[in-house]
Image (tube, rainbow, N blue to C red):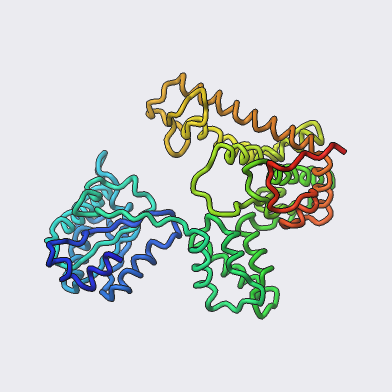
Amino acid sequence: MEIVDFLRDPGRYSKLGAQIPHGVLLSGQPGTGKTLLARAVAGEADVPFFSISASEFVEMIVGVGASRVRDLFDQAKQAAPAIIFIDELDAIGRARGGTSAGGNDEREQTLNQILTEMDGFTGNEGVVVLAATNRPEILDQALLRPGRFDRRVTVSAPDQRGRRQILAVHTRGVPLAPGVDLDVLAAATPGMVGADLKNLVNEAALLAARRGHSQVSTADFSDSLEKIALGTVRGIVLSPAERERTAFHESGHALLGMLTPGADPVRKISIIPRGQALGVTYQAPEADRYGYSETYLRGRITGALGGRAAEQVIYGDVTTGAENDMEHASAIARQMAGRWGMSPAIGPVSVLPSSGQESPADGVAPATRELIDTETRRIIEECYEQALATLRGSRDRLDRLARTLLDRETLDEDEAYAAAGLSPGTAPAAIAPAKAG
C-alpha cells in the first residue's frame, strides 16, 4: 500500500525529500501469491505493469540478457510511473563467485546490468521494481543492499481467515450446494496456500461433474480434500491378514492422537490403500500453529510411532509399514535435540542448520554429532515407550476402533472418536486409560 500511495501521489513525498524504495523483494513458498500480489499493486496504483521471468533474460549468446534488461528499464522509464516485475529472481540473482563458463558468465553480466539499472535511479523516475523468489537466501548480497531491493516482504501461507477469503474468490463461479460451509473448509486446510486452495475447488468441481451433480456438495469437497491430503486410491486388494494388521496400525496412530496431550485431533482414518501407503490417518490442528512446544512435538513423535507400537502390542512383532513414520519421528527428534535446544544434554544451543541435517563443513564437533545421535534416540525411545504404555492401557479402545475400521474402511472424525468411546474436543490430559479387555 506504501508503493501504491507513492505512485498515486508522488508529490506528497517529494515535498519532504522522501524517496520511494527502489525495489521490493517478495519471498515465500510456491503458490502463496507473490505474482498475484505484484499485479494487485499495479492494478491498485493504475500504472503500467512490465512483467518478465528472470530466466527469459538468460541466453547462451553473451550480452543478450544485459541488452534485454536495458530495454525493459528504458520502456518502464518512458511509461513512468510504472512497475517492473521480475519473477523467479534467483534464476539470475544467485550469489556470484566460483567458475564462470558459458551461461554462467552470461548470467553474471545480466545480474550486473540489473544492479547498474537499479543503482542509476535518481529517485524521481517513478519506476518501482518488484521481484519474487522462493529462495532469498541464495541471492547476491549486492541485490539486497539499500538502494536496490531494500524492502523484503515475506508472503507466507494464509491463516484461516485468509483461506476463507481465498476460497470465496475461487468458488465465485462454482455453484455450491446448500450446506457447503467455507469456514469449515478453511479450518480443515491448515498450511494450504492459494494455489492449493484453487486446486481443491477445481478437484471438487471435477468430482461433482463426474458424479452427475448440478452443484458442488460438501461431500465433493471432503472427498477432494481427502484425495489431495492422503493420496489417490490404489486399486489393490489386501489379504484379510494384512488388512487386519493395517487396521490395527492405523488405529494405533489414531488412538494416540486422541489420547496424547498436545496431539492434533484425528480428522479421518482409512485402510483404503492410497499412494504408497496401505492406510492413512489424517490429523489437523484446531487452529493454525506458528510455534511448537516440546509437549506438542513429543505428541507428534508418539503419534507417528503409534502404528508400530500397535503392531507390537497386538502381534508381538513389527513390519516395514512404519518406515515413513520412523523417518518423520526421527526428523522431529533430531531437530529437537540439535536445533531447538530441547535436550538437557546438549543445552539451549543450536548446532544444526535449519534443514536439521549436518553438512561436512558446518563446524560441529564429532563428539557433538554423536551426542545429537544419542539424544535423538533417547527422545524416540521415550516416546515409543509412552506409545506402548498408552495402547496397552487402552487395549479395548484399540480393538473397538480397529474392528469398526475393518467394517467401514473409512471413518471420519465423529465416527472415529465414537468407535474409541471418546468425543471430539475431549482434553487428552483428562482422559483416563481404559482397562484392558
Q: Is residue 173 left or right of residue 387?
A: left
| Quadrant (top left/top right/bottom left/bottom right) for the N terminus | bottom left
What residue is rendered at 14% in x and 66% in y?
Answer: 14
Q: Is residue 306 left or right of residue 87?
A: right
Could you tell me if residue 256 is visible in this image?
yes
Could you tell me if residue 410 is visible in this image?
no
What residue is rendered at 23% in x and 48% in y?
Answer: 105
Q: Is residue 176 left or right of residue 63?
A: right
Residue lying farthest front?
430
Whole-percent x, y for residue 432 in the image: 76, 40
Whole-percent x, y for residue 164 in the image: 53, 66
The foreground one among 60 and 209 is 209
Total numbered labels placed on residues in the image: 0
Q: Is residue 4 left or right of residue 230?
A: left
Placement of 239 over or under 436, stated as above or below: below
| Quadrant (top left/top right/bottom left/bottom right) for the C terminus | top right
